[in-house]
């Protein structure tokens, strides 16, 4: 009897919900190396014997043995696929939640940027107004400084005029005092002369008998 054997390596899975024994040879009489490989277990297929209907496989733990090829499929069983899909769905949901969170954070960030931009715009406008007021105040300060200089010059002129007026007033007061002195002296002298004349007249009248 000829034996058809194909030697290669690919990945296969235990089909349906079964527990398949892993044996040391290509028959049910050979020693069991693993009492039950659950359906959905991934195995590395090393060899296929179409005549015996067995395939040589290796587990993830490194055990090599034979089991019936009819229990092997090239695609994961439905339960395994469902678990995988569920995991993928959970992953996608987590990614979706993360995306939503990032989007919310992005919107919050955009709102914050908008608020910051509005605040900066308001501050810029305020600073522009303050700068304009400072320019106006600076212009006023320059004008006031010029006015102060002019007032200082005018004050100097006025003080000089006051000094001149005081000097003229002092001179005028001196002239007036001298004039009043002369007038007073003249009046006193006139009074003395008049008194002397009257006294002499009285005396003369008494001596000549001119009065009763």
Image (cartoon, helix red, strand yellow):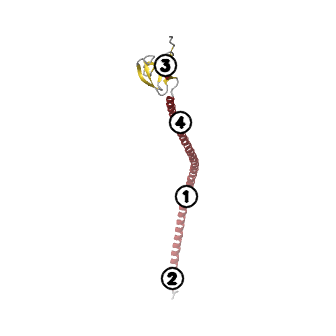
- Label of residue 162 in the image: 1
Of residues 66 and 108, the one drawn nearer to the viewer in this rendering: 66
Of residues 22 and 123, the one drawn nearer to the viewer in this rendering: 22
Q: Quadrant of residue 115?
A: top right
Q: Is residue 72 above or below residue 88?
A: above
The residue singled out by tag 2 in the image is: 202
Q: Secondary structure at mark 3?
A: strand
How far apart, in angstroms, are the residues tagged by discs 2 and 4?
148 Å
How far apart, in angstroms, are the residues tagged by discs 3 and 1?
127 Å
Q: Residues within 10 Å of mark 2 (few under 14, many from 20)?
A: some
How far apart, in angstroms, are the residues tagged by discs 3 and 2?
182 Å
Q: Is residue 158 above or below residue 83?
A: below
Camera-nearest label, 3 or 4: 3
1 or 2: tag closer to the N-terminus = 1
What residue is shown at x 55% (from left), y 42% (from top)?
111
Camera-nearest label, 2 or 4: 4
- Residue at the limit of the structure toward the bottom, as seen here: 212
């Amino acid at each position: 009897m000829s034996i058809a054997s194909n030697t290669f390596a690919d990945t296969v899975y235990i089909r349906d919900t079964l527990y398949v024994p892993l044996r040391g040879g290509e028959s049910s009489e050979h020693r069991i190396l693993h009492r039950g490989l659950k359906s959905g277990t991934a195995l590395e297929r090393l060899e296929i014997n179409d005549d015996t209907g067995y395939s040589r496989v290796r587990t993830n733990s490194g055990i090599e043995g034979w089991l019936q090829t009819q229990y092997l499929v090239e695609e994961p069983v439905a339960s395994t696929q469902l678990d995988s899909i569920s995991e993928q769905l959970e992953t996608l949901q987590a990614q979706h939640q993360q995306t939503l969170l990032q989007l919310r954070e992005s919107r919050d960030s955009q709102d914050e940027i908008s608020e910051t931009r509005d605040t900066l715009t308001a501050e810029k406008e305020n600073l522009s107004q303050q700068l304009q007021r400072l320019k106006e105040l600076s212009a006023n300060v320059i004008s006031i400084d010029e006015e102060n200089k002019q007032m200082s010059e005018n004050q100097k002129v006025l003080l000089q005029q006051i000094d001149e007026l005081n000097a003229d007033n002092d001179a005028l007061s001196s002239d007036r005092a001298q004039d009043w002195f002369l007038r007073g002296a003249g009046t006193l002298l006139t009074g003395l002369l008049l008194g002397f004349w009257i006294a002499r007249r009285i005396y003369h009248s008494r001596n000549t008998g001119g009065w009763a």
